[in-house]
Amino acid sequence: MSLCSERVTSAILLPTESYSYKEIRSFVENKMPGKSRGNDFLQYNRKALSRIYPKGQRVESSNYDPYPLWAGGCHMVALNIQTADKYTQLNSALFSMNGQTGYVLQPEFMRYDSYDPNQEKKKVKYEIAVRVIAARHLPKPGRSIVSPFVEIELCGHTDEKLKTLVYRDNGLNPVWKSPADSAVFTVFEPELTFLRFVVNEEDMFSDPNFVAQATFPVKGIRSGYRSVPLKNGYSEHLELASLLVYIDVQQAGKAEEELYSSSSQLKKRQAEVGGEPLLYETHTNLQRAAPPHQHTLLAREGSTQRTKEKKINNSKFYS
């Protein structure tokens, strides 16, 4: 197999016309072309098939990071599926986009000559704000009571991570009370980016121990309050275990474009009717035009004397 890998590495430098869609070549992970040949390898993957497999030195069945190979257009990235780690979980999330049928079409942007997998990404497409609210029925890794905390991780071109506070001695219905800071992530390539929730528990030595996880493609995430079903390390569902989260997905530049379009329409309408100004360009006009009850509400919210908040019964969520 290593001889075949060496042969393919040298064949990448051949003209793309010599490749055929009937060809498939295998690469061992440590014989992959470097970044200097990344574009050549991408051109090869547009014409022929490639298979990547772990090197023989991984006697403990560990795995390599499949993301750079997916970004390079590789078609079959073999992993040690018997190992419950982050990379097999990303693999399961990738193929969940097509009902786990065994294949996923490459993103359209990878078919353009301008795409460079090693180039620094600058165009932000989405901004995702995530806040963990609560959890329920977390499994116990041992006999002790779980003290959970949640790590929110964005896996893709850049790795960003944020974790919640540790909730002491409650794995049944921990609630992370507000105000809580939301994790805000910037997404450059939503087709190859994943949002991952990892629930850990802190033991008596302050060391984290894995409890559960949930990994999703960013392309399939929607805004709102969401119940996140948790899975074990092998991506198998855990009965009743879930997270309650709030997710806000915003497309970069969309809000500004909609505001500009609305302002343009209002100005056009103002010119047609020839009436009073329809746009509140000053703070004075905004105060004069606001209904009395709205103005009172704004003043109450801005006051230093807060009214007593009404307690909310969350028993339905945990029943």
Image: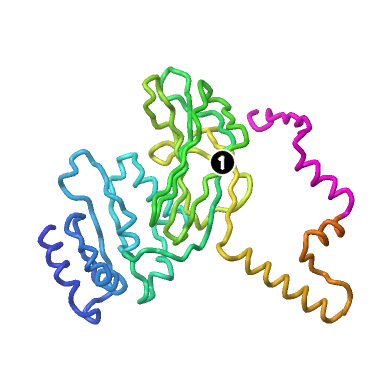
Q: Nearer the viewer, residue 102 or 70?
A: 70
- Left or right relative to 163: residue 177: right
Q: Position of residue 309 (x, y in %)?
A: 75, 31
Find numbered disc 1 in the image and state the secondary structure of the residue it sits on. Answer: loop
Q: Is residue 301 magenta?
A: yes
Q: Nearer the viewer, residue 221 or 153?
A: 153
Q: Position of residue 194 (x, y in %)?
A: 44, 52
Q: Nearer the viewer, residue 40 or 233?
A: 40
Question: Where the N terminus falls, by quadrant?
Answer: bottom left
The residue range painted magenta reads 291-319
Q: Position of residue 63 (x, y in %)?
A: 27, 46
Report the residue marked by disc 1: 181
Residue positioned 40% across, 64% down in the render: 121
- Left or right relative to 157: residue 255: right
Q: Identify residue type, mark 1.
A: Asp
Q: Is residue 240 magenta?
A: no
**In the image, residue 208 above or below residue 269:** above
Residue at the limit of the structure toward the left, as seen here: 3
Q: Is residue 206 visible?
A: yes
- Left or right relative to 273: residue 23: left
